[in-house]
Amino acid sequence: MQFINSRINFERIPSEQYDLLDFKLDRMRELLSRLGNPQRAIPSIHIAGTKGKGSTAAMTAAILSAAGPRVGLFTSPHLHSIGERMTVNGQQPTEDELYSAMEVVRPVVEEMDRLGPSMRPTFFECITAIAWTHFTSCHVNLVVLEAGLGGRLDATNVCSPRATVITSISHDHERLLGDTLAKIAAEKAGIIKPGVPVISGVTQAEPRDIIRGTADEHDCLLYELDREIRWSLADIPNSSFQDLPGLSPKIIDVQTPWRTHRVRVPLPGDHQAQNLSLALTVCDVIAQKRVVIPHNAIIRRLAELRCPLRIEVLARSPLVIVDAAHNDGSVDCLIDTLKGVSSGERVLVFATSKDKDAAGLLNQLSDHFDRAILTQFVGNPRSVPVPTLEAIAQDHLRIPFEVAASPTAAWQLARQRAKPVDLICATGSFFLAAEMRAVIRGASSNRPPHSPV
């Protein structure tokens, strides 16, 4: 891990310190070629999008594994262990398995280092290669790949997909991907391959037309949300979270070109119903060449699925939620979902990365919370320092706020102030949500046995 962590890691570097020229598919192709091109031997489902790609990837992998094959899932970033990024039928690699894959990849990376600075594999490229090596050793039948950044130049974009998915388009990484939805859509549409079916959840006219044009140019069948793919609420009562109706997992009917599915969405929010609709369509596309996945198996796999940091409820009294929203689209989804939740005072715990639109996010959130605690995550140097965030908030946050030096301090402050009927929501960054989750779960584990958690 010291060797892997010594590589350039764009997950930990502010975006102003690099540009798209630093992303080279030729470098990734060379790395995988020296490893025997595992990405050509194992078919894949490739998923890109501004938001929703991680949830869609997890649901797709869960459903596909219900048919019996060994399904690999590659996602990023991770919460605790790098093995979370490369699971097989939901299972992380053991330490021995992860070490074995690293032993295969490391000497190849060292060989490439000698080719010069431009050919030195990055952290993400090494991790992607390790994942492919692990999937090969596990004899997986199919890999579901979540793109890291963008799509066109992402290290995952050297796969051999059976289907490609673009979940959504909104503003994010604008300096790298473009300052309009059309430009961002063009980068995401870079994963589209000739003749490979495309499933799209993009509904805004401008980016939708870009994806349609790219699919047509590559002679791809295109299945779009609200056209070939539709979902609606099923008229069935759901007993889960009756005290928190806005967070109650929905039971929906999903109509694809081939089947109608009645399923329970494992995650809260209409956006997750849309993501599940895309995942089911992917599985129906794949099923045209394979055995149809039994409905009961789909229901079972979805019920077992866990996706941390997706409007995740950690406590009930007060209601405590962590969410990885970090751009305008994902914050909109969070706000829409919380509208149905009744509570007392609403407390926002907020931190974000230097390359995000902190002012815009605070503007979005201002009208939906009563007060805020501004902080910074400590495990990643991309965090906006508290004094900087405080200065931004003076102009863009329209509710009272306090500051805290760390997620631990922010949680202590929020917990001191909160009444049992209140809502505490930590959001603004994956890294904040992850650190707050660890702090809150640690605090919860130290509570007396009968505390209301």
Image (cartoon, helix red, strand yellow):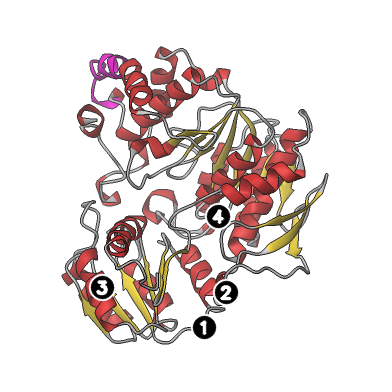
Local packing at callout 4 (Cα closer than 10 Å; few below 14, some 14-19, many 20+) is: many
Kindly identify the amino acid type of the residue bearing the numbered disc 2: Gly
**How far, Cα to Cα, is label 2 from label 1?**
8 Å
Q: Earlier in the sequence, mark 2 or mark 1?
A: 2
- 74 to the left or right of 231: left
- Cβ–Cβ below 8 Å for labels 2 and 1? yes
Q: Is residue 363 left or right of residue 146?
A: left
Counting from the top left corner in percent of width and height, residue 10 is at: 30, 42
Label 4: which residue?
182
- What is the CA distance from the residue labelled 1 to the residue labelled 3? 23 Å
Q: Nearer the viewer, mark 2 or mark 3?
A: 2
Q: Is residue 133 left or right of residue 59?
A: left
* In front: label 1 or label 3: 1
Q: Which residue is mark 2?
A: 246
Q: Is residue 87 above or below residue 257?
A: above
Q: Amino acid at mark 3?
A: Leu
Res 297 quadrant in image: top right
Point out the frontmost of discs 4 and 1. Answer: 1
Amino acid type at circle 1 is Ser
What residue is drawn where x is 49% and y is 52%? 307
Q: Which mark is residue 342?
A: 1
Tell me, yes or no, whether the highlighted magenta stretch contains residue 307: no
Foreground: 20 or 203? 203
Judged by depth in the image, the label closer to the viewer, 2 or 4, is 2
